[in-house]
Image: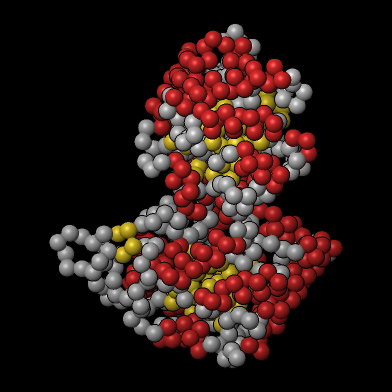
Amino acid sequence: MKPLAEAIAAGPLLLDGAMGSLLYERGVLHTRSYDELNLSQPDLIRTVHRDYVIAGAELIETNTFGANRIALARHGLAEQAQAINRAGVELARSAAGEQSYVAGAVGPSGVKFGVASASERRTARFALAEQIDTLVLAGVDAIVLETFSSILELEEAIHVAKERGPRVPVFAMMVFDAQARSDGGLGPAEIADRLVAAGADVIGGNCGIGPAELYNVVTGMVGHGKPVIAQPNAGLPASVEGRTLYVANPEHFGVFARRMLKSGVRIVGGCCGTTPEHTRAMLGAVRMLRGETTKIEASEGTKSSPAIDLHKAPAPPAKMPLAGRSKLGSRIAKGEFAVSVELTAPAGLDLSKTKQQVEQLIAGGIDIVNIADGPRASARMANVAVCSRLAAETPVEPILHVCARDRSFLGLVAHLIGAHALGLRDLVIITGDPPKMGDYPFSTPVYDVDSVGLLRIAAGLNAGVDPAGKECEPTSFVLATGAEPAAHDRDRELRRLEDKKHAGAELVMTQPVYDPRTLERFLDDVAPLGLPVMVGILPLASARNAEFLHNEVPGMSIPAEYRARMAKVAAGPAARAEGILIAKEALAAVKDRVQGAYVMPPFNRVDAALAVLEVARDRWKKPRT
C-alpha cells in the first residue's frame, strides 16, 4: 500500500463507521468501558473492524476513542491506558491486513478547556500525549482527533500529535450543531482556518448531526488549504422504547457521500449510529469519484499496438469523420442546432407506449431521442434493446446512454461492440450515480472504469484499436459526455471535462440548467476546449419536485426565484404549466450560445418537451453564426 498521505492526496477515501453504537446494538451495555473490550473481548472488536473492511472501508479507526487515562479513570482503568491503546492498534491492524489503513482514534480528554485551570489543562495535555504517543509507537498510519467540542482543546491535541508523530498525518474534527456553528459560535470557515494554523493535515467535522446538516458544514471548510473529512451521524438521535436510535438509512448516506465528494470533500465515513451497511452504501460514491488510472496491457506474443492507457494518452483519431457517423454527428459537424428528447425505458416488455411517444415527437419535428441507462435503480427494459427497436421500427435516431456503473470492463467492451452491431451510433458516456433508491438500492456498483476510461475505450474502437491494443474493425460512434454547469467544485468539473475531451469526447450534454448566468459562466469556461454543448432542460413538475432537485441531486441548482414561483401555484396542471414556462425561459436565454438542447420531460410527457423546444424552433437546422 502507498503511504497514507499519498492516498489522501489522490483521494477520495472511505473511512469506517461507528464503533460504540454498534457495540451497544450487539449487546454491550453502555455502562461498560468500550475501550477496555480491546483486552477482555478482542474477538468482538476484531469482528467489527473486519465487517467494516469487508464493506469497503479503506481506513479504519482503532477502538480507542475514550482510551486516555482521565476518561478511563471513571472505570478504574487509568493504569491500563497504554495496554488498551496498544491492543486497539493490534486488533485493527489484524483486521485491516493489506486492505485498509489504520488510524488511532483519540477523543476529548474530558477536561472542560473553556473553564479549566492551568493545572487541569496540563493534566489533560499529559493524558492526550500519553495516548497519542502509545498509538504512534504501536504503528498507526494516522491520528484521528474527533468529536471535539472545544477548539482550544483540539488545537492543543493537534500540537501534541505533531510533536509525538511528526510524520503521521493528523486528522482534526470538530462537532457542529444543526445551524453549522461550533465552539463559541464559530462557523466552518473560522474553524477550518484555526485547525490549519494549528498544524492539522486533514480538517473536518463529525458527530452531532446527520449527513444533510454536516454537508453544509464541511463544504464550508473546503478550499482552506487542507483536505476535508466528513463523518456524520446516522441522522439525529431519537429515543425509542428506551433505546437511542439513528434514522438516516444507508441509501441516504450514499446520496450525501456523493454530494460531499463532488463538493470537494476528500474523505467520508460515518459516526454514531452508522454500520457497515452505511459504509457499503458510500463505497459506490467513492469509487465513482476516484478516477483511478486503468491500463490494459496487450497480450504477450501477439502482434498488436501498444496498450491503451485509459486516462493519460490522447485518444486516437477516429477512422470516420464525425459528419458521416450519424444524423446527430452530421448536425454537430455542420454547426446546426440539434434537438433531442429523453425518454425512460418501459418497466416491462411492452414498448407500444414508448413508440406512441416517439410518433408524437416525430410529428412535432423531433427525430432524435435519448434513452437513459437504468434510471432510479428500477427494473426496466435494457436501453440498448429499446434503442435497437426504435431504430428498426420508427424514423427516430436514438442516443444510447452508456453507464460505467453496472458492467465489468469486459462487459462494457462487449456492450459497445454489441450496440454498434445493432446499428446504434450515438452514445452518451457517463460514470453513473451509485444505486441508491428505487426497488433495488442494494445493487452492487462495479466502476471498473469511469467515464474518462470508457470514453477512451470507445474512441479506441472508433480508431480500430481494441483495449488490448490489437487492431479491430473500426466503429463509428458519436461520443457525447455529461457535465454539471452548477457543480459546487467548478475547478474539478472543468478538469474532468478537459480529461473527457482528451479521452475522445466530441459533444457535451449538460445536466439541467435553470439559471442562465450559471450556464453563461460555464460556456465561457469551456469555450477554450472547443467542445459543442447541448444544454439539458428539465421542466419542473411541482414545488416539491423543485425542492428535491435543488437539495438532493448533485449538480442541480434551481434559483430561489423559480422555486418560489413553483410554490405559488397549485400542484397538478397549473404547476406543470409553470414548470414548462420556467424551462422555456431558461432555454430562450441561452439558445444562441449552445449547439443544441435536449429536454428531459417528467414521466415521459412529450407534450411538455415539445412546448419547451418551441422557443428554439427558429434555431433548428440553421447554421450557427
Q: How many marks?
A: 0
* Left or right, 271 with reference to 417: right
User: Outermost residue, right direction?
Assistant: 568
Give how far across and how far down residue 16 sits, in percent.
51, 35
On screen, residue 201 above or below 85 = below
Between residue 591 and residue 71, name the one nearer to us. Answer: 71
User: Which quadrant of the rendered structure holds the C terminus?
Assistant: bottom right
Residue at 78% across / 62% down in the picture? 560
On screen, residue 168 above or below 398 = above
Between residue 112 and residue 354, name the one nearer to us. Answer: 112
Q: Specify whether residue 609 is in view.
A: yes
Give how far across and how far down residue 590 sits, in percent.
67, 79
Which color scheme does this rendered protein use? secondary structure
Residue at 35% across / 78% down in the picture? 317
* Left or right, 83 with reference to 583: left
Q: Specify whether residue 22 is in view.
A: no
| Quadrant housing residue 114 | top right
| Quadrant housing residue 522 | bottom right
| Quadrant housing residue 537 | bottom right
Residue at 51% across / 86% down in the picture? 331
User: Which quadrant of the rendered structure holds the N terminus?
Assistant: top left
Give how far across and how far down residue 11 sits, in percent.
48, 49
Residue at 44% across / 59% down in the picture? 450
Give how far across and how far down residue 366 sits, in percent.
58, 82
